[in-house]
Amino acid sequence: MRNNQLKNEKELSGTFLSFKEYRQKINTDFTRSSVLNKEFCIDLKGKNTLVLQELSVLLFCKQYTEQLHGTLVLTNVSAILKEFFELTRTDGCFIIKSVSV
């Protein structure tokens, strides 16, 4: 499973991923049948805060991935960003695999 995760990982440090870019990545890299039961990881390394637009993009990406029967996973989430998800009550919406201190 780890090899599939590495192929599907998108790092967000620096510029932020748009929903259109995420959808294109899934649609070009994978056929519908190969998306089933796969984890798509978004690496939030270096991000300590999100603006509302970025949070909404993550929510749309999660919804789109679930429509394809995949799973969106957030990795390298900072402790501050984890608290942000808790304060906005969106922590239950995402699978967070690793929290960095």
Image (cartoon, grey):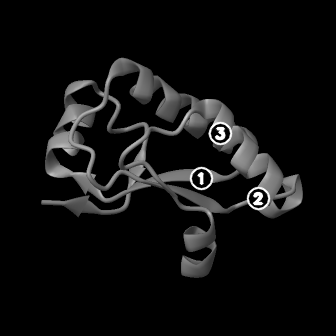
Q: Secondary structure at mark 2?
A: loop
Mark 1 in CB contact with mark 3 (< 8 angstroms): no
Name of the residue lying farthest toward the top: 52
How far across and down, in percent of the image, does residue 66 sit? 66, 42
Give the quarter of the figure containing the C terminus: bottom left
Gap in angstroms between the C-alphas marked 1 and 2: 9 Å
Residue 21: numbered disc? 3
Disc 1 marks which amino acid? Thr
Q: Which one is nearer the viewer's eye here, 17 or 26?
A: 17
Packing grade of label 2 (10 A; few <14, some 14-19, many >=20) is some
Residue 12: numbered disc? none
How far across and down, in percent of the image, does residue 53 sit? 43, 20
Q: Which one is nearer the viewer's eye here, 13 or 88?
A: 13
For label 2, the residue is 36
Residue 71: numbered disc? 1
Query: Residue at point 35% right, 51% down?
Result: 44
Q: Secondary structure at mark 3?
A: helix
Query: Residue at point 40% right, 28% down?
Result: 55
63 over 69 or under it: above or below: above
